Image (cartoon, rainbow, N blue to C red):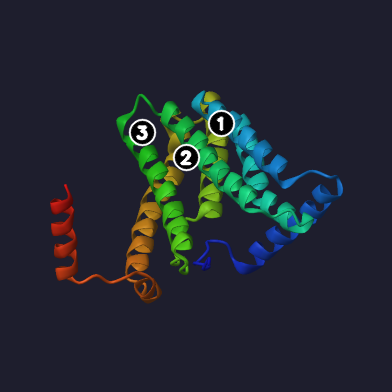
Amino acid sequence: MRARGPSWLSPWIARIALGTLDRVAWVVVALGVSANFVTLASLGLAAVGGLLVGLGKFAWATGIVVSASLGDALDGLVARRSGAASIGGALLDCASDRYGETFLLGGLAVHFRGSAGPLVLTLGALTGSFMVSYGSAKAEALGVAVPAGAMRRAERALCLCCGLGLTAGLTAFANAGWLAPWTADVPVLIAVGLVAAVGNASAIGRLRGLAGSPSLALKLPVSSEPDRVRAHSRSLTNH
């Protein structure tokens, strides 16, 4: 049960993007390409992109990471359009998402390994990314609506891809001597900082909303304190 939270994208941009991806999905289905193949191909691209980020090759990494992100958005549409949606495919997609984000942010962590501040910021972004996804998965596992929140998967991908692209452009200017070398990493650091700050705040908000959900309270059994004490006493007696 997935609730739609606020999005940074305006509705008409989202509609255009989804419409374009939907048309691409029909082409992919017509070519006989499976959703799982798209998922695994996206994961492979994410691994290559993370490696290039770790090596500081942001220009090459940007195009590959953008392609991986588009593939991640495409595989679900392909599964639905081909009638091949399954629990196994959904699990593969979720696992691929987590690994893909680990590759990208792990690559950034390697890139910033010599600077404590940027490294901590990157680890904070990785934590926020995982915790936002954990809040969604936990709500779905409990069968309640996912609390609204910002910095979802698509928003994180957009933020990080923009940061990578701008850093690639500034790196070219810095290499030409037009900018100070330290300025090149500013865009990606801003992007990572946004993911870290907004992602963790959103994750905490989601978990608090989930804990206070009336529908969740109705699903969970309520035990009285005496019952728990008696159960504990029986446990001690048995042992």
Q: Position of residue 218 (x, y in %)?
A: 37, 75
Task: Classify mark 1: helix, strand or loop.
Answer: helix
State the residue at coordinates (63%, 30%): 60
Q: Residues within 10 Å of mark 3 (few under 14, many from 20)?
A: many
State the residue at coordinates (42%, 57%): 135
Task: Classify mark 3: helix, strand or loop.
Answer: helix
* Left or right of 200 in this view: 188: right
- N-term-proximal mark, 1 vs 2: 1
Residues at discs 1 and 2 in contact (Cβ within 8 Å): yes
Q: Position of residue 18 (x, y in %)?
A: 69, 60
Q: Is residue 230 above or below residue 124?
A: below
Task: Classify mark 2: helix, strand or loop.
Answer: helix
Q: Residues within 10 Å of mark 2 (few under 14, many from 20)?
A: many
Residue located beneath label 2 in the image: 188
- N-term-proximal mark, 3 vs 1: 1
Residue located beneath label 3 in the image: 119
Q: Position of residue 209 (x, y in %)?
A: 36, 68
* Left or right of 22 in this view: 107: left
State the residue at coordinates (14%, 70%): 226
Residue located beneath label 1 in the image: 58
Q: CA distance from mark 2 to mark 3?
A: 12 Å
